[in-house]
Image: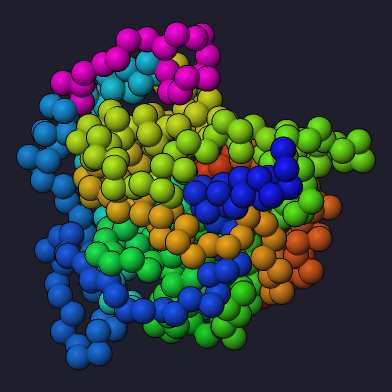
Amino acid sequence: MSKESTLDRRRFVGVAAATVAAGPLGLLGISRRIDAMTHALTDVAQPTGSDGTDIRPFRFKASDADLTDLRRRINATKWPEVEQVSDESQGVQLATTQKLARYWGTDYDWRKAEAKINAVPNFITNIDGLDIHFIHVKSKDKNAMPMIITHGWPGSFIEQMKVIGPLTNPTAFGGRAEDAFDVVIPSLPGYGFSGKPTATGWHPVRIASAWTTLMKRLGYTKFVAQGGDWGNAVSEIMALQAPPELLGISTNMPATVPPEISAQIFMGSPPPATLSADERNAWDQLALFYGKGLGYANEMALRPQTLYGIVDSPVGLAAWILDHDARSYALIRRVFDGQSEGLTRDDILDNITMYWLTNTAISSARLYWNTGQVSKGGFFDPRNVQLPVAVTVFPDEIYAAPRSWAERAYPKLIYFNKLPKGGHFAAWEQPALFTAEMRTAFRSLR
């Protein structure tokens, strides 16, 4: 393969995937046009102020008709024949999908998830022309550190709900009062209860700026940011924008892959003999993901509007969401086989049902397309973040970043830890470990 064709392929994957890490070095020069409006999702009171900065309480209740229709559609699914292989190499397996559908269409109860959501303070505010939904829970400790936590795809704010209590009320969960956080968990544009952009231009740079606006609107003069997946891209770009209020960031899916490593993987070269054990493990994980795990990202980055099927079929939506990464899928498959894992059947279906009830399958996918229009970077390319960075490595993430790569990517690496278990949906799968990491990682910035 020629050098030119290798670079073209790398550029295609960097743009077409434009996925969980996004790598958007080239995003920083984009003009931030106010070009999106949205429709209201519920009967939340409309802003009364003239400056558009109102923060309005929010509650959600799905209609009985929508829940009845969901169950009807699940039980009316037209099934394909079984896959031709005994593993997941052809995609999400029929047996797993049918077990999910059987539970979803009979015993699953969305109202339990709805009650949990409405039990915490939810709000809507308009930023840059778009309604942004967020959860905001303040600690009773007056010295609590404000932290904004950003989800990714195919997640939602539901991913982070298990850590709200332990982070805001640490003494009730075995922690110390001085480790308390105020927690802000927004929904990305086009996701969950946030507005759906009707024009292009909402990408991680614009979102990063909006998040800083949100934290300042809440009255915070100092805060930290955390994220994985798209949340890492947003958090790292917040650090590149370097607002004076931002003290540092934490990531559980960092962008650390050295450019020479990415180039060799894309060329199909064998792994260098000089790699350490952790570096070789990361190489193998990346080679698998780049080679066989990017189908969903390519489609959403190139042709998101074509995905009508996952808007019309709840089971189609569920299978699309399950097919994110190999280790997460393996965990979910075990859950529906009856094994005990960090997630439950209800956890998984709460998130999928959120996508269904808010009709955000395509609006969320457009984040990939919008990023792909402006992204110049490679997939997990380092962004030269100069603010303090804390890295937590979960072994079943898309790739487990080695310390050597993290030290090279982040000149101000203030914390690095590799955990024994956990994967892509860290706060959701391993809330106790995630909470302990946040307490330790940000302690030096208090």
What is the x, y in percent for residue 437?
A: 66, 54
Answer whether residue 435 is visible to the viewer in this image: no
Answer whether residue 198 is visible to the viewer in this image: yes
Q: Is residue 357 left or right of residue 300?
A: left
Q: Is residue 382 left or right of residue 367?
A: right
Q: Is residue 88 magenta?
A: yes
Query: Considering depth in this image, is 46 or 324 the residue closer to the camera?
Result: 324
* Residue drawn at point x = 64 percent, y = 72 percent: 248
Q: Where's the C terminus, which quadrant?
A: bottom right
* Residue drawn at point x = 60 percent, y = 52 percent: 11
- In this rendering, the answer to whether 327 lies above or below 75 is below
- Specify the farthest residue to the left: 65
- Specify the farthest residue to the right: 274
What is the x, y in percent for residue 307?
A: 29, 40
Q: Is residue 375 magenta?
A: no
Query: Considering depth in this image, is 254 or 383 the residue closer to the camera?
Result: 383
Image quarter for residue 216? Answer: bottom left
- In this rendering, the answer to whether 303 lies above or below 321 is below
- In this rendering, the answer to whether 121 lies above or below 433 is below
User: Which region is colored magenta?
Assistant: 74-93
Which is the main secondary structure of the residues drawn in magenta?
loop
* Residue drawn at point x = 44 percent, y = 69 percent: 207
What is the x, y in percent for residue 411?
A: 79, 69
* Residue drawn at point x = 68 percent, y = 45 percent: 6
Count the labels in the image: 0
Image quarter for residue 354? Answer: top left
Q: Where's the N terminus, which quadrant?
A: top right
Query: Considering depth in this image, is 357 or 338 the residue closer to the camera?
Result: 357
What is the x, y in percent for residue 412?
A: 77, 70
